[in-house]
Amino acid sequence: MKIKEILKQREEYIKLRYQKLYGANEYEEYLKRDKQALRKQCVILGVLLLTVIALWILLGITNKPVIREGKKQEIIEVQRPPKGGKTTTLDTKIWAVKDGKTVSVNREIVIEPHNSKNTSDVSAVGSETKEQILERKLSEVSRGLNKDTSKIKVRLPRVLKDGTKIFWQKQEKNYLTLIIFSVALWVLFFGAGRYRGIKKEEREAKASIIREIPEFINKLVLLMEGGIVLQEAFDRIIADYETSDVSNNYFYEQLSQIRHKVKNTNCVMYEELMSFAKRSGIKELMRFASVICDSAYKGNDMSEKLRKEGRMLWFERKKQCEKSGRIAESKLTFPLMILILVLIMITVAPAMINM
């Protein structure tokens, strides 16, 4: 029940963020699009994870050597792959018993094909153990398995040279761990991805407003100084955007919605503009909307105020561009250093080889 409530609260939280971004009447389409994109990504990730699991299981089955087991699943002998075949590996757990003490070691033994040349000095890879002496002796035994590949069957030794009894058991691959890890990865991706879409749109919306508002104010001032009233100047700028090839511009799309709403419902333009500014929470837009509202309520001349606001916004935009440039330069420094190191290595390597 708690999980259901948490999921419901998350959905409501995301819904409120979309409402804040696009307005109470327009958010549903964007929310639906975000859900569809997330669902598609989760399906693709799920298919990829299932493919990896299936391939891992298939490789584990096809690369498994034929073994003969005794009592208690003890491995007695292993059959080599046929001549010209691929080298196979076998995960084992080795039990060593001496003087009443028992030690277990996990090892992967390599079985070379029948009548093949032994190309490796070490044919076992396993986890480290505190008993280093036993580890060394087991490594010697593992290497000895492929010294003579003329016999099709490899009989695993039961006793070491010092009298230590050893027992070999097959270690099954832990497919359950991979499945649990894959499910956990999918759940984490879904949980993180639920907010990824709205966060991206919020960043793009903020960037769009800060980028476009200085130019919009300049256009508005030029039209108003040419004798056009505020409402008509606003309509002309938005109409030019709607007939242009530019699309997916958050700032102008929101202004376009305001224009159509004012035209169809007889709402007041500057009140809708102030509502948009409050929803965005961006100080530059709120200052611009405040100038429009103050002039509308008090009857003041807004051209000079808008011109000053426009100059200030252009200055802030210039500073932001300079800051972005410095960040881009710092990000390029590390790849450039790597490239220089590679060039130095390419230049110095022949001389070092000749030495």
Image (cartoon, grey):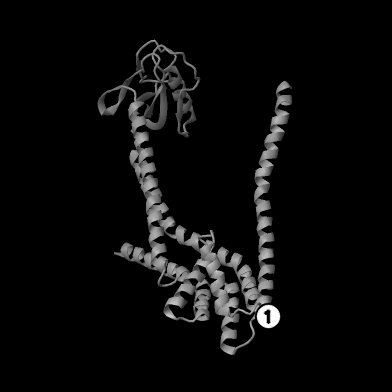
Q: Is disc 1 surrounded by few (<14), some (14 to 19) or many (20+) residues within 10 Å? A: few
Residue 251 shows in the view: no
Image position of 336 (left or right of 237):
right
Q: Residue at left 46%, top 81%? A: 267
Give whichever of 316, 305 is nearer the camera: 305
Give the labeled residue for mark 1.
304
Residue found farthest to the left? 71
Is residue 124 depicted above or below 16 in this figure? above
Horizontal and vertical percent for residue 206? 55, 65
Give whichever of 345, 33 is nearer the camera: 33
Quadrant placement of the N terminus: bottom left
Picture quadrant where residue 284 is located: bottom right
Residue found farthest to the bottom? 298
Secondary structure under the numbered disc 1 in the rendered image: helix
Q: Amino acid at mark 1?
A: Glu
Horizontal and vertical percent for residue 336? 68, 43
Image position of 244 (left or right of 60):
right
Horizontal and vertical percent for residue 268? 49, 82
Give whichever of 36, 336 is nearer the camera: 36
Is residue 233 depicted above or below 300 in this figure? above
Give the number of marks.
1
Q: Residue at left 38%, top 13%? A: 83
Is residue 303 depicted above or below 50 in this figure? below
Horizontal and vertical percent for residue 4? 31, 63
Residue 36 shows in the view: yes
Q: Residue at left 33%, top 62%? A: 3
